[in-house]
Amino acid sequence: MAQGQRKFQARKPAKSLVIAPKKARIVQQQKLKKNLEVGIRKKIEHDVLMKASTSLPKKLALLKAPTKKKAAAPSSTKTPS
């Protein structure tokens, strides 16, 4: 048999946020517009990348940070004696 007192009373779940129909339609249109813009931007970037990679002999690396060379760093800090 359970002893003691329950610490928390059982509660009903809170009501969900209800948006007015006109506002909901506007919000949906804004989301759609944003998703379309993102999709168009990604498609344009992809097309430019493909076109550039076919015309360049070297592979095009877009939005990649330059890699650091571990061997070159210590040799540049040495002082000639």
Image (spheres, rainbow, N blue to C red):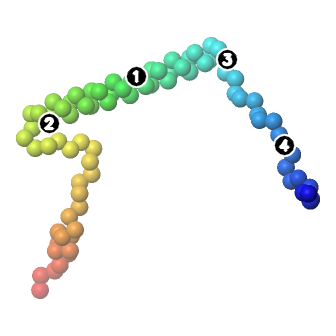
* Mark closer to the observer (1, 4): 4
- Label 1 amino acid? Leu
Identify the residue under disc 3.
20
- Quadrant hosting residue 39: top left
- Quadrant hosting residue 11: top right
- Please report the residue visible at 33 percent of the width from the left and 24 percent of the height from the top: 40
- Label 2 amino acid? Ser
In three-dimensional space, the C-alpha distance between marks 1 and 2, rounded to whole angstroms, equals 26 Å
Mark 1 / mark 3, whichever is N-terminal: 3
Q: Position of residue 19 (x, y in %)?
A: 67, 21
Mark 2 / mark 3, whichever is N-terminal: 3
Q: Position of residue 22 (x, y in %)?
A: 62, 13
Look at the numbered disc 4 and give the secondary structure of its residue: loop
Mark 1 / mark 4, whichever is N-terminal: 4
Mark 1 / mark 2, whichever is N-terminal: 1
Q: Are marks 1 and 3 in contact (CB under 8 Å)?
A: no
Identify the residue under disc 1.
36
